[in-house]
Image (cartoon, rainbow, N blue to C red):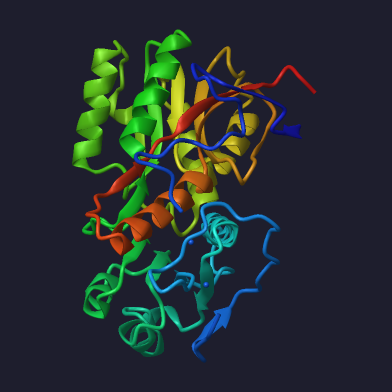
Amino acid sequence: MRIKSNSKAVKSGKQAGQPLPIQGKSAPGFGGGSPEFHSAPAKSQPKEAQDLIYKPDGKPLRIVIYMGADPSADAHNVFYLNLFWKIMLLCRERKIECEPLIDSRPIYRQTEISPDLANALKNGAYDGLILTMISMHHERALKSCHVPFAVQTLDKSDSSVEYDHRQMIRIALRRLADLGCQSVGLILPEDLADASMLDYIKSISSRLSLNVEYEWMLISRQARQAPEEEGHKLFHALWSLKKRPQGLIVWPDLMVRGVITAIIERRVLVPRDLKLVLHRNAESPIMEPFPVDWAESSVGPMAEGLLLQIMKQINGESTKRIKIPFRIVSEDASSD
């Protein structure tokens, strides 16, 4: 068993490990504090910075990077911490002053931005605000602050940046079709598998001549609370059926770990009995003992997109939602 052995990008000019592209040009670039926040530790500035960003008065931009959660609360936060640090790194490279703030208030009090932070924004202490892992209720408070802001996945905001899950489903289905599958199952969380997404899956699979039976689409209602256990349980349910698909798509990566365990327990021969396209974040490797194709995402393009949204607003440009694509990466499990 190993981690990320011989990765190859499939049908792409990029090598494994390179950042994904974002829609639009490259994004460009925080001290202070509040008693309700923990300031994250800062790293030293690089000797040379890219894309030096200054205001008209010659002073550097000052931006708050906010994460509204306790990083130890659940496994999902590993992704958000990776994103948090990546944004900080990009700001340092561009000589943008950044104030990293992790909200330590109880979750029930995080229905709006901290009053201290809101006042600082209104008084012009900061030029912009990047938010990750926040409540939907933050949007109203953000608009009242009248400061440029960018949000990691907030459906109603033109300043949001999100992963393109339809594109992920499309390239995963196409990959399984290319591998010779004629039937495909999916294990997905409830918040992704709404009616429009299920219709989209049916449309794309039909176009690719893939059979997707209703009973092969297993939807988890507990993916956020117990993702690994859910993935484990749902694969056992799938493999207990008399008729099984030849290929399987699983998202997100936290459910993937449970699916891999269940595959081993069931002694399924991969890829002979089942071909897999599984999700992973490039920054969070997953151990796999058999050949797998990955639908891979990365925090790099997400961080770039969030900074791009901020810079567009500071420059007086309009913004629209940015969608970050996934890519297929093939794991050659025959290599040690």
Is 143 positioned to the left or the right of 256 in the image?
left
The reply to whether residue 67 is in sight is no
Furthest-front residue in this view = 57
Is 94 positioned to the left or the right of 171 in the image?
right
Looking at the picture, how far across and down is residue 222, in whole percent? Answer: 41, 54
Rendered residue at 36%/48% (across/down): 162
Q: Nearer the viewer, residue 54 or 160?
A: 54
Can you say whether 130 is above or below 181 in the image? below
Which part of the image, by quadrant, shows the C terminus? top right
Looking at the picture, how far across and down is residue 219, in whole percent? Answer: 35, 42
Rendered residue at 30%/59% (across/down): 315
Looking at the picture, how far across and down is residue 122, in whole percent? Answer: 30, 84
The reply to whether residue 40 is in sight is yes
Q: Nearer the viewer, residue 331 or 62?
A: 62
Q: Nearer the viewer, residue 199 or 81?
A: 81
Can you say whether 206 is above or below 25 in the image? above
Question: Picture quarter containing residue 5?
Answer: top right
Rendered residue at 44%/29% (across/down): 249
Tally of numbered tags: 0
Which part of the image, by quadrant, shows the N terminus? top right
Is 242 positioned to the left or the right of 227 in the image?
left
Rendered residue at 59%/62% (across/down): 92
